[in-house]
Image (spheres, helix red, strand yellow):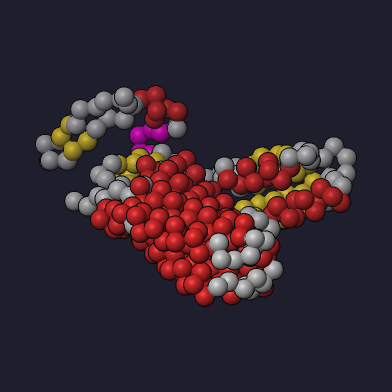
Amino acid sequence: MGVIRRIQRTPSGTFFVCLPKEWAERYGLKRGSVVAIDETSDGKLLIDPEYGAAPPSRVVVLEPGPYLSREIIGKYLLGFDIIRVEAKESISFETREIVKKTVSRLIGLEIVEEDYSKIVLQCLLEPTSFPPEKILRRGYATVAGMHRDVVNALVNGDVHMARSVIARDEEVNRLYFLLVRILRTIIQNPSLSEKLGLQPIECLDYRLTASLVETIGDECVRTAFKVLDLKGTKLTEALKKLIVEFHVMVYGAHENALKSFLEGDIALAEEVRNMRPQVEKTLGALEKSVKEQSLEAMPYILAAVSTLQQIYEHSVDIADLVTPKSRKP
């Protein structure tokens, strides 16, 4: 439990409360010092002792090594502003290529300085310009497009469209990394929550939902690879019809799941879960219809259908995170 203080009141009617002495001294506050007081949507007051001061840049130094790419991504997700890659001698061409490839996967991270022994990366993003809901919606829109296209590729044997779906997965990953960085920034700087429209306590659910959306994108990629394995195999008309029917249900499930999450719509979330009997019935019909295809094609078609079924399961997981939106007083 934090420090407890009793509220006082002046004769003129002004309310006041004393600040902890140790806290005030730690931040160099004295009579006449200015602090910022912000009210959150749930009625809490945040007192900022460094009002008007620009937060210092967070800097980390990394050495070239076998896990350099993973280390750069990790520091980016942790919110570091400047990542310095420094070697005792010169940095090899291979290491420079690894750094450049990693930078291309992270939105806002740029190489701002480079010489024979160091590469300086800086994140040029302003967190307040990237509300988490906006990033999540953009990532979902990309994934939803991948889902539509991969089903068309499967039904029509379109390998070119399948490759397009695979290529778009990188953008989904970039948006996911960006969202994780913003969410961690909010947790470390609660004063940002009001500006970004998300309370720190909501960040975990956003992280889980974003992860599930990203996983739906991965399922689309797995389906696309099965389309490539089929090499343009023609499907029976009955099977095509069932795949499209299955797609409509699964697509509607993740569309409603995300909508219910963003709007706090419990009833809509329950609709997603209640779709299971119809989803399983259509899946059973699909599996029977696949037997009409050649023995060579059957495993790939069944695997593709299985990944589409997993998309429904991820939709249910998103729906399970839905809680009613609290109303402001």
Q: How many marks?
A: 0
- Residue 30 is one of the magenta-drawn residues: yes
Residue 286 x/y as whole percent:
48, 62
Highlighted magenta segment, given as a residue range:
29-33
Residue 194 x/y as whole percent:
36, 51
Could you say which is closer to the camera, residue 176 or residue 302?
302
Residue 13 against residue 226 in the figure, above or below: above
Question: In this view of the protein, can residue 272 be seen by the observer?
Answer: no
Q: Measuring 33% from the left and 52% from the top, which residue is drawn there?
A: 273
Residue 116 x/y as whole percent:
86, 49
In the shown orientation, is residue 146 left or right of residue 97?
A: left
Q: Measuring 35% from the left and 59% from the top, which residue is drawn there?
A: 278
Could you say which is closer to the camera, residue 64 or residue 129?
64
Residue 272 x/y as whole percent:
34, 56
Q: Measuring 80% from the left and 53% from the top, which residue is drawn there?
A: 97
Question: In this view of the protein, can residue 96 be seen by the observer?
Answer: yes
In the shown orientation, is residue 182 left or right of residue 24?
A: right
- Determine the main secondary structure of the stretch shown in magenta: loop
Residue 70 against residue 241 in the figure, above or below: above
Could you say which is closer to the camera, residue 243 or residue 170?
243
Residue 65: name its quadrant. top right
Q: Measuring 75% from the left and 55% from the top, which residue is drawn there?
A: 100
In the shown orientation, is residue 119 left or right of residue 37?
A: right
In the shown orientation, is residue 321 left or right of residue 63?
A: left
Q: Considering the image in quadrants, where does the N terminus appear?
A: top left
- Residue 78 is one of the magenta-drawn residues: no
